Image (cartoon, grey):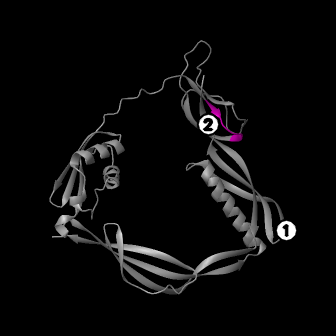
């Protein structure tokens, strides 16, 4: 009787461009989720209005309860067709660099390989000569760009390591409520990390709203590592590489790195790292 009083399955129908997970997330926020008591749900009219309010991409939604399943039917809004921009533009340099590669799909190249360009300089012109038409310039201009990173790396570093000691706690989850069923007692570890894994239960194609959660509590200890000068240099290069990778995008690449300056003070290596990268330096600029 208890199992027939809760929701076992939530299904979304009618999504095309919108992901069903978006609708399921909105439904969960208004109380529709596996493990929820059916008798405690608001009227379907209220649920429909709340889901519609939380997902502006929908124009209509319907909620029906069929046994222990909830069916959410939706109709997505038809987005207006946005016209493609046609205003003329140049492609200009957004940073200083030496041109390495030019790929023009529309417009006229104004630079050549090996040329030093400065920010704001026109790379691909949308103007097709005097008296000629103006177009929306498109293309890619890759250039060699230099980055400098000022870093400090301590020779002594504290890192956490697993000791190999651990114990397990088990929980039974009914919906989102965890009930501990095994692994009672005081945690003997001063420093530890918890790793949780959930196990689901199925009857045919249905997933029960009950989960068994295993939580492994692993003891950790802090270890002090002492780096030598060469290891500290490599650490500085890796830090600089990670920082620059976030700035140049997925298509940029680092071609070389060099330490320009270094000094050792107060147990730290102070360095200045030069990184040479190849990246697209173009950006659109309307006439």
Please tell me whether mark 2 sits on a helix, a strand or a loop.
strand
Q: Which residue is mark 1?
A: 265
Residue 91 placed where, x, y %? 60, 31
Residue 168 placed where, x, y %? 42, 83
Q: Residues within 10 Å of mark 1 (few under 14, many from 20)?
A: few
Based on the displayed image, in which of its 4 quarters is residue 176 positioned?
bottom left
Residue 3 placed where, x, y %? 19, 69
Based on the displayed image, in which of its 4 quarters is residue 120 positioned?
top right
Q: Nearer the viewer, mark 2 or mark 1?
A: 1
Q: Quadrant of the N terminus?
A: bottom left
Where is 260 relative to 171, above or below? above
Marks 2/1: CA–CA distance: 41 Å
Please tell me whether mark 1 sits on a helix, a strand or a loop.
strand
- Magenta residues? 91-98
Residue nearer the viewer, 259 or 200:
200
The residue under the point 21% across, 65% down is 206
Where is 79 relative to 239, above or below? above
Look at the numbered discs 2 and 1 and tell me whether their residues touch, using CB distance below 8 Å: no
Q: Is residue 63 magenta?
A: no
The residue under the point 55% across, 34% down is 139
The residue under the point 60% across, 52% down is 246
Q: Quadrant of the C terminus?
A: top right
Query: Which badge, 2 or 1, is on the more N-terminal residue?
Result: 1
Residue 14 seen in the current view? no
Q: Which mark is residue 282?
A: 2
Most common secondary structure along the magenta stretch:
strand
């Amino acid at each position: 009787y208890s199992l027939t009083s809760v929701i076992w399955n939530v299904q979304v129908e009618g999504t095309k461009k919108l992901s069903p997970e978006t609708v399921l997330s909105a439904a969960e926020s208004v109380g529709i989720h596996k493990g929820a008591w059916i008798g405690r749900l608001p009227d379907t009219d209220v649920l429909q209005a709340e889901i519609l309010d939380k997902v502006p991409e929908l124009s209509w939604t319907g909620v029906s309860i069929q046994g222990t399943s909830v069916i959410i039917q939706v109709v997505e809004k038809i987005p207006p067709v946005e016209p493609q921009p046609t205003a003329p533009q140049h492609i200009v340099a957004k940073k200083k660099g030496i041109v390495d590669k030019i790929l023009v799909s529309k417009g006229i190249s104004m630079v050549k390989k090996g040329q030093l360009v400065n920010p704001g300089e026109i790379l691909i012109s949308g103007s097709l000569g005097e008296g000629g038409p103006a177009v929306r310039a498109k293309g890619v201009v890759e250039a060699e760009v230099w980055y400098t990173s000022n870093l400090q790396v301590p020779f002594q570093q504290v890192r956490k390591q697993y000791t190999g000691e651990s114990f397990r706690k088990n929980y039974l989850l009914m919906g989102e409520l965890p009930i501990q069923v095994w692994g009672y007692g005081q945690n003997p570890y001063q420093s530890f990390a918890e790793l949780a894994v959930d196990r689901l239960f199925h009857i045919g194609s249905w997933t029960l709203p009950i989960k068994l959660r295993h939580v492994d509590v692993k003891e950790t200890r802090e270890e002090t590592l002492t780096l030598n000068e060469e290891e500290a240099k490599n650490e500085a290069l890796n830090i600089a590489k990670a920082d620059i990778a976030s700035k140049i995008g997925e298509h940029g690449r680092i071609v070389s790195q060099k330490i320009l300056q270094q000094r050792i003070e107060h147990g730290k290596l102070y360095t200045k790292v030069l990184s040479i990268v190849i990246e697209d330096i173009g950006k659109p600029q309307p006439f």
